Structures are given as C-alpha cells and as structure tokens.
Image: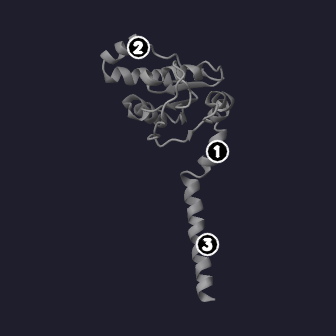
Amino acid sequence: MKKVFFSFHYDLDNWRVQQIRNMGVVEGQKICNPNNWEKIKRQGEQSIKNWIDRQMKGCDCVIVLIGEKTHTRKWVKYEVKRAKELGILVFGIFIHNLKNSEGKTTRKGQNVFNIQCYEPNSKDAYHDIRDNLESWINGDAFSYFKFFSGFGLFIIVSFFFLYYKKITSVLTNA
C-alpha cells in the first residue's frame, strides 16, 4: 500500500477527504485534529513547515484534494512547492462532486498549482476515485502527460518546426 500525503482545505473539505482516506486504497497520513493544528500554528511558520516536512517524509506522493477554495490556502501552496522540491510525485483530484456530511456537493475548485489533475465522473465520484486512485498514484494515468511535458514537449515542437519548414519550402518551390 502506497503512503500518501493529502493536501486540502481542512475546514471546507475534511469530510470529503475522510471518505477518500477510508477507501482503504492508500495509507494516508494521520489528519491533524483542530486542537493540534492550533498548537502547531501558535509556534509559528517554521513549526508549521517542520510539521509538513515530517508528514511528507517517506511518502510516495502528495495528492492535492481540490475543493472549491483549496486554491486560496497558503499551506496547500507550500505543500505542493515543498513536494516538488523533494521530488515527490504531486497530482490533484477535484473533489467537488463528493458529498459532504449534509449530502451536498460544491462548486469545482481551481488548479492554480501547475500540477496534473483528475476530475472524477460527476455521476459517481466516490467509486471513480476508489477504483482509480492506485493507478493514479503509480503514475499510470499521467504517463501520457509526462511524455508531453518538459523535454518531451521540446522534442515534439522541434520536429514540428523542422518538418514544417521542409514542407513549406517544397510547396513554395513547386
């Protein structure tokens, strides 16, 4: 079972996150309860950063569970940045179609994190996440995107322009 660090907006999305943790697909970090979080926060920003670093240690990936306002959270942004610095796989899952404790969904959040994201089927988000989470963590779903990012994209664009020049020169000389 893969070890995962979940990054999310605690106040708004804790219920949705607990559904994902309880699927039994991954070993997620213990979610910090509000009392402990307040204690950590009172000790200052460095204490928060240290706590995040300790929680991420040994994780196979960081999953940003993107709710309606996750993009506004300072510490979610830090967690994504830190995971990238540590070379930990980071991806997002939109969780707006998971129901909260009152059985309601919410509006889709924004991906401002420059990460690959998955949007579960709106008709059955819970089962879609449960059935696919392991393959997403293993990177299966994003291997196509990884090829088309970074150096792979550079190669494709370079070949396009090289052949584009050749084709246009043949057509103009004909």
Q: Amino acid at mark 2?
A: Pro
Q: Quadrant of residue 60?
A: top right
Q: Nearer the viewer, residue 59 or 64?
A: 64
Are there few (<14), some (14-19), or many (20+) residues within 10 Å of tag 1?
few
Q: Amino acid at mark 1?
A: Ser
169 up-or-down from 72: above or below: below
Between disc 1 and disc 3, whose residue precedes? 1
Badge 2 vs badge 1, beta-carbon distance below 8 Å: no
Q: Quadrant of the C terminus?
A: bottom right
**Residue carrying label 2:** 34
Label 1: which secondary element: helix
Residue 47 lies left or right of residue 27; in this view the side is left
Residue 130 lies left or right of residue 82; in this view the side is right
Are there few (<14), some (14-19), or many (20+) residues within 10 Å of tag 3?
few
**Disc 3 versus disc 2: nearer the observer:** 2
Separation of marks 3 and 2 at Cα, in angstroms: 59 Å
**Residue carrying label 1:** 143
Q: Give coordinates of residue 149: x percent, y percent.
A: 55, 51
Q: Amino acid at mark 3?
A: Tyr
**Residue carrying label 3:** 163
For the point 54% across and 31% down, which residue is it? 95
Image coloring type:
one colour
Q: Give coordinates of residue 3: x percent, y percent.
A: 59, 24
Q: Quadrant of residue 123?
A: top right
For the point 58% across and 38% down, which residue is it? 119
